[in-house]
Amino acid sequence: MNTNAFALRHIGPREDDQNLMLKTIGVDSLDQLIYETIPDDIRLKNGLNLEDPMTEHEYLLHIHELSKKNKAYKTYIGLGYHPTILPAVIQRNILENPGWYTAYTPYQAEIAQGRLEALLNFQTMVIDLTGMEIANASLLDESTAAAEAMSLLFAVRERDQKKAGINKFFVSENILPQTLSLLQTRANPIGIELVIGNEDTFEFSSEFFGAVLQYPGKDGQITDIKSFIGQANAARIKVAVAADILSLVKLEAPGKFGADVVVGTTQRFGIPMGYGGPHAAFFATKEAYKRDLPGRIIGVTKDANGNRALRMALQTREQHIKRDKATSNICTAQVLLAVMASMYGVYHGPQGLKFIANKVHNKTSTLAHALEKLGYKQINTSYFDTIQIKTKAKKIKKIATEKKVNLLYPDSKTVIISINETTAIRDINYLISVFAEAAKKETITISSIEKANNISKTVQRQSEFLKEPVFNTYHSETELMRYIKSLERKDLALNHSMISLGSCTMKLNAAAEMLPLSWFKWGNIHPFAPLKQAKGYFTVLKGLEDQLTEITGFAATSLQPNSGAQGEFAGLMVIKAYHESRNDHHRNICLIPSSAHGTNPASAVMAGMKVVVTKSTAEGNIDVDDLREKAELHKDNLSTLMVTYPSTHGVYESAIKQITKIIHDNGGQVYMDGANMNAQVGLTNPGNIGADVCHLNLHKTFAIPHGGGGPGVGPICVAKQLVPFLPGNPIIKTGGKDAITAISGAPFGSALACLISYGYIKMLGAEGLTESTKIAILNANYIKQRLQGSFDTLYSGERGRAAHEMIVDCRPFKANGIEVTDIAKRLMDYGFHAPTVSFPVAGTLMIEPTESESKAEIDRFCDAMISIKKEIDKATKDDNNNVLKNAPHTLNMITADEWYFPYTREEAAFPLNYVRDNKFWPSVRRVDDAYGDRNLICSCIPIEAYAEA
Ligand SMILES: *Cc1c(COP(=O)(O)O)cnc(C)c1O
C-alpha cells in the first residue's frame, strides 16, 4: 500500500474503522451497502476513465511545471482587471489560512462573528467610496453586478412606468464589453430592451426606465456623470454606475450625484487577477431599494444579553420569495475575496489608499506627457489611470509584444494603456521606449513622477471616506496580524471540527490543492491576455473540463458560471437557445419538484420561464403521477424539468429514469441540479439517469473551500445537442459555435479557483473519487444508524438506506418546547457547527458528513447529538430556562460571578468530557433574529413560495 496516496489523506475513516462502521450498519461489505443504496438500473458498468492519481508531491511538481507555461507579461490591458499588490500579511493570514478559507456561510451567527465583522467592514468601505446608503457583502463579478443593477432598476420602476410597460434601458457604449454581453444575456428573457449609445448625445425620453454608465469608461475617459444623472433623474430615469473602486478615491462618489445603484469589482484591492477570478464585486444602492438588493447583507443586531452582534439580514430571503417576480438567484457570493479586499482597506486606510491612487494617477499623467513629447496624440481629456493614444496600433502591438508588454488595441488606430499599483518608474520608461521605437525616435527617460490632476473639476472627489476607527488603526503588520487573528478566533471552521452541512458538502480542502493559488504565475495572468500567454491555464482548464465531462457522462463542459445558481441560469439559457434553434420559441414551462432548492425557481424566472411546481409523495419522492399529468398538460410548451439527484431529501429515487423519459416524451429537456453530485461520482452520473445538462458546485463536490460564502465555481456539463450553445465571451473566444452571450465577465469564470478541483481530481484519480463517494455514503449511513433511537430519519431509499446525507426530524421535540434552532445553538456548546437547518423540510436537520470525516470525529458528533437528545427529554413545554434554550453559552456567562441557571456551569460548557480538550467559545450569546432567520439556509427558500396559485 502506498501510504502517501492522496486518497488516504482525503478520506477520513481508516480501513479498520470502515469495517467497524459496516458492522454497526449491519452489512458485510461496502459493496453490499452501495448495492442497498443505489438503484441497480442507474449504476455505471465501467469505472471512470481518468489519468492515474498523483501523490501530493507529484502534483505540486506537475502544477509547478505547468505554471511555467504561463507568461506573466507586463500588463496594461485594464477592462476591469489590473495587476495588484496583495499585502503579504493578508496572503499569509487569510488566503493561506484554513481558519478563514474553510469556514461556511455565516448562517450560525454566534460562531461567525469574525467574518461577519470583516464583511461589515467591506460594506462600510463600499458605502463610503460609492456614497450610497447600503451595500451587500459581495457579488460574483462586476458584470453580474451590473446585470443585477439593471434587474433591480427594472423591478423598482414607478407604478405608472410599469403600467405603461416602459422597458428600455440605456447602456453607455463605453461600458466594458463583457458587461454589455452579460446585460444582453439577462435583459432579453425578462423583457428589457437595451439601447446602446453615447451618453453625451442621449435624449432623455420617458421610454426609458434606467441607464448604466461606466465610470471611468472602458477607454479611460471620465464621463460627466453629474450632469447625466441630473438630467436622467429629471426624466425619471434611474441610473446605475459601474465604477472603478480605486478611481473613486479621486473621483466624487456617484451617490453624491444621485446615482441609484453603484457596482464594480474590488479586484484592485489586492486580489490577484487569476486569469479572471475569483474577485468580489460590490453592489451599493439606496435604502429605499433594500428589499430588492441581491445577495447577502450583514446587519447589526443584539444578542440575548443585549450586546452588539452581527448576522446576515433577511433581505436575501425577501428577494427570493417574490414568487415569479424574483429578480435574482444569488446564493454563494465571494466572501473570502471580500474579506481580503476589506483587509486591504483596513491595512492601507484612507491615507494609504490616497497615496496609491495618487501614485497611479501621477504615473499615468507622466507617461501621457512623455508620449506627447514623442509626438503621440493622447485624446482623453479627463482621466484617472487610463490613456488613449491615436496611432497605428499594429506597429505598437508588434514592438510591445516583442518586449513582453500587453496593451489594449480596441481598433487599428487606437492603443489604450492602463496604469496600476505595481507600475514602477522603470516600467514607465520601458513603455515609453516601446513608443519611441515605433516612432523611430530616441527614447525619453523619466527620473521623477510629476504631480498631476487630469480629472475634470465637476467630478473631483470632495467627500471624505473611511473615517471609521477600523480603517485608521491597524496599519502595522503586527497590529493587522492580530486583528485578523482576533476575528479568526471567533469563527468555527473546518480546522476546528466537522461541519455537516447537508447539501453543501464541507469536505477537506487539501493544502496541496490550495498552495498553487499563491504562485505568481497563476495569479498574474490577465483574463484577456493573448491565449499564447496562458498555456498553463489552458492545460488546466481544458483538463478540468475533460475530467468533469467524463464524470458527468456528458459531451462538454463550460467553466464560466461563478456559482451553482449561475450554472442553473446558464443551463436554462442553453436549453432555451436549443428550443429556439428548433423554432420552439414558445416552450417556456419549467417543472420543479416541491423539494427543490430556492435558487431553482429563481433561475427559471430569470430565464423567462414559467414555474410549475410538482408534488412530492409521503416518502419524499417526486410524485410521478403528478409529474406525468403536468408534463402532458403542458406538453406543447414544456421547456424543462429541474431535478436534484439524489433528491434534496437524501434519496436516490428509483423512478429517475422513468421521470426523465416522461419529460423527453413531452418535448422537454432535463436540468439536473448537481449540488448532490458527491453521491454520484464514479457510481452513476447525470448522463446515465437521462439528464441533458447539470451544474456542478465545485465548492461542494470538488474541494474548492467554501470561503465563508464563496468563491464558488458552478460549471455546466451538457449532452451533445446542447454543446453548440455553451456560453461565450466577447473578447476571448469560448463556448459553442452558436454560443449564448456571457454568463460571467471572464471567459473561464474563476479560473484560479479551478486549479483546486483540477488538483483534487488529479490526485484522487478514478478509484479515489469512486471510493470517496462510497465512503461519503458509508459515513452518512453510519450516522443514521448511530442516531437511531434518538432521532428519526425522515426519508430513506427502498432498501432502508440513506444516500450521502439524511434529514433527521426534530419536530416531535416541540412537545418539550424545543425547536430545531435550540438544537443548532446547543451543538455550539459541544464544539460543532449545526447541520443544515430547516431545508428542505421545516423543523429538521440535514446532516452530510462527507468522506473526509474520520470515525472518531463522527462519533464525537453523534455523541453530542445523543447527549442533546437526553437534554431534550428533560425539557418541558413551558420551560424557557434550560440548557437548550439558553444555548450557546459564552465564556462570559460561565465565568460570571453570578449564575442564575437551573443547571451547572459544567453542564452548560463541558457537557461531554471530550469538549474539555478542544473547547470552542461562541463569542456572543444567541443572536436576536426577530425576523425569523431560522429558516434561512444558503438562501434556500421554500419552493412553495413560487408555486402557481
Ligand atoms: C448550494 C445549492 C445550490 C446553489 O448553489 P450556489 O453555488 O450557492 O449558487 C443550488 N441547489 C442546491 C440543491 C444546493 O445545495
Image (cartoon, helix red, strand yellow):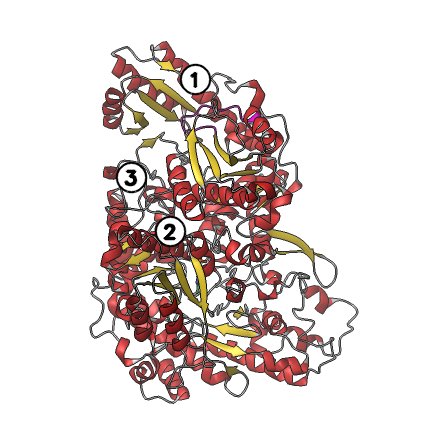
Provide the residue designation for mark 3. 732
Q: Residue 216 magenta-drawn?
A: yes
Element at badge 1?
helix
Residue 821 coordinates in the image, percent (x, y): 61, 71
Mark 2 or mark 3: name the one nearer the start of the chain.
2
Residue 399 coordinates in the image, percent (x, y): 24, 22
Provide the residue designation for mark 2. 561
What residue sits 56% from the left and 24% below the top? 227
**Labels 3, 1: front one:** 3
Provide the residue designation for mark 1. 366
Residue 58 coordinates in the image, percent (x, y): 25, 57
Pick the residue in front: 891 or 117. Answer: 117
What residue sits 53% from the left and 80% below the top? 863
- Which span of residues is magenta-colored? 215-226
Task: Look at the image and tell me whether residue 478 can be seen.
Answer: no
Element at badge 2?
loop
- In this rendering, position of residue 352 left or right of residue 505: right
Q: What residue type is labelled 1?
A: Thr
Q: In this view, does 881 lie above or below 179?
A: below
Location of residue 457 (image quadrant): top right
Mark 3 and mark 1: Cα distance apart in space:
31 Å
Dominant secondary structure (helix, strand or loop) of the stretch shown in magenta = loop
Q: Is residue 755 above or below residue 593?
A: above
Label 1 C-beta lies within 8 Å of the nearest ligand 1 atom: no
Location of residue 801 (image quadrant): bottom left
Q: Which amino acid does label 3 sit on?
A: Ile
Mark 2 and mark 3: Cα distance apart in space:
16 Å
Q: Which amino acid does label 2 sit on?
A: Pro
Q: Residues within 10 Å of mark 2 (few under 14, many from 20)?
A: many
Q: Residues within 10 Å of mark 3 (few under 14, many from 20)?
A: some
Task: Look at the image and tell me whether residue 943 can be seen.
Answer: yes
Q: Residue 327 magenta-drawn?
A: no
